């Protein structure tokens, strides 16, 4: 994470909109990225979404069984209240990355504690994973760009 992101990451901006008062982001000046930010866009509690980043490596020979369980968990996650989306990535070296977004902490926690998900987690530790790590983060800012067709 760069200097600018570290300095700005925890700003919980309150109130406002397009006409809200603005001030200079002090951290941006230090790295030559002067910009104004509104004194506040709030996405209800200050969080756009809750993001779970799940990185793992599957044991050799366990790919087929893992794939079946992963598909079942993906289908289950999509039925959960507050589910936004999920993405899957596989590196050339075999590391898997799953990114799942939920509307809020309660939705993410309900998913993480769902009985079928808990059983799949245990099966993963027993049968599938060489290693894994999980990060759960509050997304405080989101911006999307799509090129015109």
Image (cartoon, helix red, strand yellow):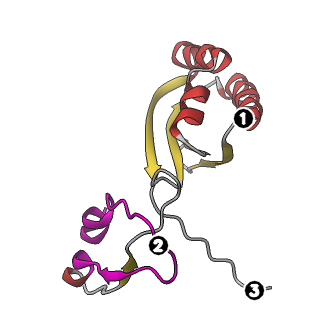
> What is the quadrant of the C terminus in the image?
bottom right
Horizontal and vertical percent for residue 63? 67, 29
Q: Looking at the image, which residue is at 33% across and 61% down?
A: 9
What residue is at 43 percent from the left and 45 percent from the top?
Answer: 137
Q: What element carries label 1?
A: helix
Q: Residue furthest left?
A: 30
Q: How many marks?
A: 3
Magenta-highlighted residues: 1-28
Q: Is residue 71 magenta?
A: no
Q: Nearer the viewer, residue 87 or 48?
A: 48
Other-residue count near label 3 (Cα within 10 Å), few / some / many at <14 / 14–19 / ≥20: few
Report how far apart the C-alphas of labels 1 and 3 lie in the structure: 31 Å
Residue that carries the numbered disc 2 in the rendered image: 16
Q: Which of marks 1 and 3 is nearer the N terminus?
A: 1
The disc label shown at residue 148, or none: 3
Give the labeled residue for mark 1. 74
Q: How far apart are marks 2 and 3 (CA)?
A: 29 Å
The mark that comes first in sequence, 1 or 2, is 2
For mark 1, does the 10 Å Cα neighbourhood hold few (<14), some (14 to 19), or many (20 or more) residues? some
Q: Which residue is drawn at 45% across and 55% down?
A: 46
Does 67 sit left or right of 98 as displayed?
A: right
Q: Is residue 93 visible?
A: no
Marks 1 and 2, how far apart at CA: 37 Å
- Count residues near mark 2 (Cα–Cα under 10 Å), then give few for <14, some for 14-19, many for 20+: some
Where's residue 79, x and y in %?
A: 77, 34
x%, y% of residue 50? 52, 45
* Above or below 116: residue 45: below
Residue 17 magenta: yes
């Amino acid at each position: 994470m760069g200097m600018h992101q570290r300095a700005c990451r925890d700003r919980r901006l309150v109130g406002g909109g397009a006409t809200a008062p603005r001030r200079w982001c002090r951290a941006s000046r230090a790295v030559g990225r002067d910009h104004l930010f509104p004194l506040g866009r709030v996405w209800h509690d200050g969080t756009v979404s809750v993001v779970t980043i799940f990185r793992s490596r599957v044991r050799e020979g366990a790919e087929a069984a893992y794939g079946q369980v992963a598909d079942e968990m993906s289908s289950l996650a999509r039925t959960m209240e507050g589910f936004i989306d999920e993405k899957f990535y596989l590196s050339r070296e075999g590391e898997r990355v799953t990114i799942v977004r939920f509307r809020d902490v309660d939705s993410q926690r309900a998913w993480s504690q769902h009985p079928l998900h808990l059983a799949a987690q245990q099966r993963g530790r027993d049968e599938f994973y060489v290693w894994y790590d999980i990060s759960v983060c509050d997304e405080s800012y989101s911006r999307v760009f799509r090129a015109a067709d």
